Amino acid sequence: MNRVWINGCFDVLHRGHIELINFASSYGTLRVGIDTDDRVRKLKGQNRPFNNIADRVYVMKNIKGVDGVEAFYTEEELEYCIKNWNPKYIFVGDEYRDKKVIGSQYCEEVIYFKKIKGYSTSKILG
């Protein structure tokens, strides 16, 4: 079975997240990396995350198609997690098409997922 990786904040889950999880898990065994609370604050601002890391990991572990979850604090730790998982595929949002994808050197292919228009945790939380 192919190994598959996705990562993100996954703060307030919405349809876009579920579509990504469903799509990625159809390629193989899916491991999900989740940004820790401190990392989310650095990326999204002091009012985030809405849900703490323990809750976000719990919810993600209980979603059909998710086979494992890892939390990471830094880009280096994210890269280490990806290297250890050794995925065949890494899935990222299509907004990363012309950007560096952390850990991409440890997979055979980066697959870009077209975001579902109108779904965004930042929009939901206002």
Image (cartoon, grey):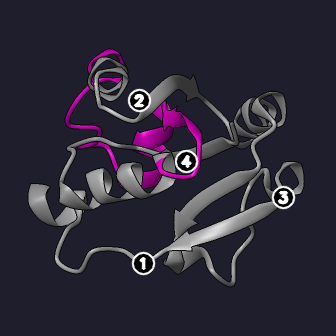
Could you tell me how far apart the alpha carbons at marks 3 and 4 are, in whole angstroms?
14 Å
Quarter location, residue 51: top left
Please say if the residues under marks 1 and 3 sit with CB atoms less than 8 Å apart.
no
Residue 45 appears in the rendering: yes
Amino acid carrying label 1: it is Lys
Residue 126 appears in the rendering: no
Q: Which residue was labeled with disc 4? A: 6
Amino acid carrying label 3: it is Glu
- Write the start and end of the magenta stretch as one range: 26-55
Q: Does residue 1 lie above or below 91 as drawn?
A: above
Describe residue 59's horizontal placement relative to residue 41 as left or right.
Answer: left
- Circle 3 residues within 10 Å: few <14, some 14–19, many ≥20: few
Quadrant of the rendering where the N terminus is positioned: top right
Q: Which residue was labeled with disc 2? A: 37
Among the two numbered marks 2 and 3 on one chain, the one whose residue lies closer to the N terminus: 2
Name the foreground residue: 76 vs 117: 117
Please say if the residues under marks 2 and 3 sit with CB atoms less than 8 Å apart.
no
Among the two numbered marks 2 and 1 on one chain, the one whose residue lies closer to the N terminus: 2
Amino acid carrying label 4: it is Ile
Describe residue 108's horizontal placement relative to residue 122 as left or right.
Answer: right
Could you tell me how far apart the alpha carbons at marks 2 and 1 are, in whole angstroms?
26 Å
Could you tell me how far apart the alpha carbons at marks 2 and 4 are, in whole angstroms?
18 Å
Please say if the residues under marks 4 and 1 sit with CB atoms less than 8 Å apart.
no
Mark on residue 108? 3
